[in-house]
């Protein structure tokens, strides 16, 4: 079995090297759109997927799963970029020098930094046995011919609490193997609005209640009940391991679980939301608007996770537009989010005028900002002279910097405060910028940080390297960001705890230390 692991790793290494050589040739010749590139990217992607598929085999040692699972996690950025390069469904303009340069850097990172130590590990493991703690024995012994069964690995995994099992090793000091498992999850009701089409298949799980992609353009209302494990770690989305052939079952004591999704009539939903609003005694609502490549279940789960992590006291809401939840669906998502922006406006109007929400705290992530900005510019949805939006947070906005600048100038009083988070280590923003002739994005950081009057800008480049989504999910994945966000929504003015002031030609902005 170890020989098969090594052969798969070597295949991935060789395919990655071949792709890197092809990429460098394309850069030298300035011939960007080449069939050879697509073929090489497809070959490298197939090798990466073969490694991922190998982890589904039930006979692998748990520590082998851990090591390879970590490699899969760390190389997600590269594989997603290969998928973009290999795709034939994207317009040719999506394959240009800027995108190519980003993929070259990420492929080089995999070939030079990630793969060599893992390959060396399994080359030695071919002639040396694993010790009990998962390290390499110094005595030369034959490799084991039979590894522990899936059942044994599963029992080992269940001794751990609250963190993804494939990121946990036996020697970890974060959680004791003998620590008690607390089985009392906290349920968060998420009052959602969505434009997605319903999944009417018999026996569909709550997570699959709505389909991916563009719906019929109508707004559907409902309540999703999401449970957070009592031992939940801020900034973590605890989910069962998804790369095993026999996927671990969702466990509310360890995982974020969507328990129920109930679509309701407008009148019933308004009445339920009014009861919830009264129970919070705040008249306020937290609204999360997701970005590109997100399905319905992740949207409501993220809303619950962020609200829980920042200890929000009001009603928790989410607006889920019709993303395809696919990397290759970027172009389609661009159109869909703009088409669904009027439905977000309708959702806000219902919450404000019908439910009675008097204060909104809105967080829009990535492409979701393209729905939020038009809704903020349209003042017709609020019935008073002053805006009910206390805080509008633009998290890694995938919006042209010039368009964002013009929008902010046109709506200075659309919110009590505007906060912008950007990062120069955000691969999704870098790719988006690359396919647009390097025009800066509002979610940029570093030298391209956007500093505007009336907007509190925070550069999160020091920590903007989330574990998934092309380093694009740091707004929900990092404790320091969540801590700052808690202060933002509490109305704490600059200077906030933990921020460092920086100077820019257009004024002052803030950075979050690593």
Image: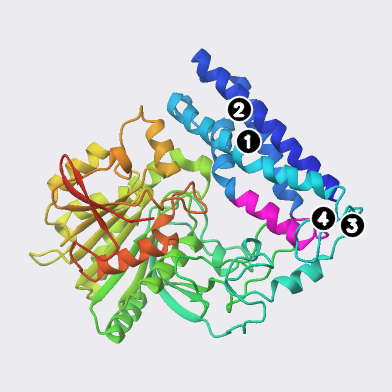
Q: Is residue 464 above or below residue 61?
A: above
Q: Secondary structure at mark 4?
A: loop
Direction from residue 271 to residue 452 in the image, left or right: left
Q: Please rate how many residues cluster around mark 4, counting C-alpha atoms within 10 Å: few if below 14, some from 14 to 19, many from 20.
A: few
Task: Answer with mark 3 or mark 4, whichever residue precedes in sequence.
Answer: 4
- Mark-to-mark CA distance, 4 and 2: 35 Å
Quadrant in the picture for residue 288: bottom left
Q: Is residue 357 left or right of residue 243?
A: left
Q: Give the CA distance from mark 2 to mark 1.
A: 8 Å
Q: Nearer the viewer, residue 174 or 3?
A: 174
Instruction: Return the x and y of residue 492 as percentages of the image width and height.
Output: 20, 68
Mark 4 or mark 2: whose residue is earlier in sequence? 2
- Return the disc, 2 or 1, that comes first in the chain's sequence: 2
Where is residue 485 drawn, in percent x and y? 31, 64
Q: Tell me if label 3 and label 2 are in contact, CB under 8 Å.
A: no
Q: Which residues are magenta?
A: 56-73
- Pick whichever of labels 3 and 2 is earlier in the sequence: 2
Which residue in the protein does label 3 denote? 144
Q: Is residue 7 magenta?
A: no
* Mark 3 element type: loop
Q: Quadrant of residue 384?
A: bottom left
Q: Which mark is residue 138?
A: 4
**Quick check: can you spot residue 245?**
no
């Amino acid at each position: 079995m170890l020989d098969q692991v090594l052969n798969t790793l070597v295949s991935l290494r060789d395919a990655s090297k071949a792709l890197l050589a092809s990429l460098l040739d394309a850069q030298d010749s300035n011939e960007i759109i080449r069939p050879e590139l697509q073929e090489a990217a497809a070959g490298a992607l197939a090798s990466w997927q073969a490694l991922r598929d190998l982890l589904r085999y039930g006979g692998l040692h748990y520590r082998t799963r851990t090591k390879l699972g970590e490699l899969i996690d760390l190389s997600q950025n590269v594989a997603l970029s290969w998928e973009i390069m290999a795709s034939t469904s994207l317009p040719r303009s999506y394959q240009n020098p800027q995108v190519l340069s980003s993929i070259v850097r990420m492929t080089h990172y995999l070939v030079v930094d990630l793969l060599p130590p893992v390959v060396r590990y399994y080359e030695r493991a071919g002639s040396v046995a694993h010790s009990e703690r998962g390290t390499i024995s110094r005595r030369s012994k034959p490799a084991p011919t039979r590894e522990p069964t899936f059942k044994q690995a599963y029992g080992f995994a269940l001794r751990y609490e609250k963190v993804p099992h494939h990121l946990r090793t036996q020697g970890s000091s974060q959680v004791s193997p003998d620590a008690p498992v607390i089985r009392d999850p906290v349920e968060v009701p998420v009052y959602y609005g969505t434009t997605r089409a319903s999944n009417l298949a018999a026996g569909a799980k709550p997570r699959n209640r709505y389909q991916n992609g563009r719906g019929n353009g109508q707004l559907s209302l409902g309540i999703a009940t999401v449970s957070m494990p009592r031992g939940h770690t801020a900034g973590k989305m605890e989910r069962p391991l998804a790369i095993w052939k026999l996927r671990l079952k969702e466990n509310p004591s360890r995982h974020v679980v969507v328990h129920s999704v109930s679509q309701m009539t407008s009148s019933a939903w308004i009445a339920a939301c009014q009861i919830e609003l009264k129970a919070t005694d705040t008249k306020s609502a937290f609204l999360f608007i997701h970005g590109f490549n997100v399905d319905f279940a992740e949207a409501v789960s993220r809303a619950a996770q962020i609200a829980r992590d920042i200890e929000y006291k009001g009603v928790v809401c989410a607006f889920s537009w019709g993303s395809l939840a696919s990397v290759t669906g970027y172009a389609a998502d661009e159109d869909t989010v703009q088409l669904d922006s009027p439905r977000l406006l309708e959702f806000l109007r219902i919450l404000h005028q019908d439910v009675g929400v008097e204060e909104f705290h809105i967080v829009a992530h990535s492409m979701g900002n393209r729905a939020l900005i038009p809704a903020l510019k349209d003042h017709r949805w609020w019935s008073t002279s002053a805006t009910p939006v206390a805080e509008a947070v633009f998290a890694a906005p995938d919006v042209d910097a010039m368009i964002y600048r013009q929008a902010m100038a046109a709506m200075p009083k659309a919110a009590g405060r505007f906060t912008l988070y950007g990062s120069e280590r955000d691969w999704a923003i870098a790719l988006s910028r690359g396919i647009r002739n390097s025009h800066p994005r509002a979610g940029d950081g570093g030298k391209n940080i956007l500093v505007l009057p009336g907007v509190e800008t925070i550069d999160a480049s020091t920590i903007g390297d989330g574990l998934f989504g092309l380093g694009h999910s740091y707004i929900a994945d990092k404790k320091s960001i969540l801590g700052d966000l808690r202060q933002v929504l509490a109305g704490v003015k600059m200077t906030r705890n933990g921020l460092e002031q920086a100077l820019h030609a257009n004024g002052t902005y803030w950075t979050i230390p690593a």
